Image (cartoon, helix red, strand yellow):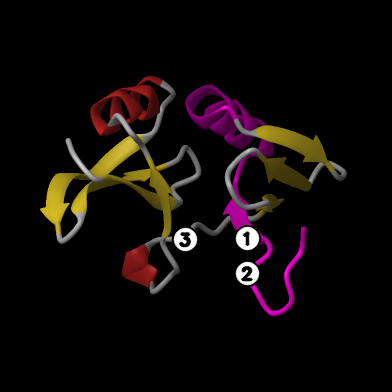
Amino acid sequence: MSEHEKINYLEFPSKDITATKTFFSAVFDWRFHDYGAEYCAFSGAGLAGGFYLSSLSCSIENGSVLAVLYSNNIKHTQQKIEQAGGVINRDIFAFPGGVRFHFKDPNGNEYAVWSEHD
C-alpha cells in the first residue's frame, strides 16, 4: 500500500538488465517484471523499485544514496553475493548497532548489507 509522502520506490541504473535480474534473483530472490528492453521493476526486496538501462553506476564515492539490505546471516549473504559475481568493496566491519559490508553488483552499483551480529 502506498503511503502519503513516504518513500515508495527506488530506481537504479543498469548497464545490463539481464545480468541485473540474474544477480538479484540468485542472491536475494527478487522478482522482476519487464517494461520493454530498457526497464524492469523488482519486487520482493522490502521496497519496490526498478532498474533502467544506463552506462552510469551509483556509489557513495560519487555521492549516491546507499541502499542497505538486512541479513540474519551476513557471512552467508556475502558468500552468495561473491558466488553470483558481486564484488565486496568493503569487508565486514563493526558500526554502532551491528556489522556490515559493502558490495558492487555486476553493474558497478554499490550497496551494503548489515546485521546485528556477525
Evaluate if marks 2 and 3 touch, with contact meaning CB atoms under 8 Å apart: no
* Magenta span of residues: 1-29
The mark that comes first in sequence, 3 or 1, is: 1
- The answer to whether residue 91 is above or below residue 29 is below
Identified by mark 1, the residue type is: Leu
Q: Earlier in the sequence, mark 2 or mark 3?
A: 2
Task: Classify residue 32 as left or right of residue 44.
Answer: right
The kind of secondary structure element at disc 2 is: loop
- Would you call the spot at circle 2 few (<14 residues within 10 Å), some (14-19), or many (20 or more)? few
Write down the quadrant of residue 6 in the picture. Answer: bottom right
Q: Secondary structure at mark 1?
A: strand
Of badges 2 and 3, nearer the viewer stands 2
Q: Which residue is mark 3?
A: 58
Residue drawn at 64 percent across, 38 percent down: 44
Confirm whether the magenta stretch covers residue 22: yes
Q: Which residue is mark 1?
A: 10
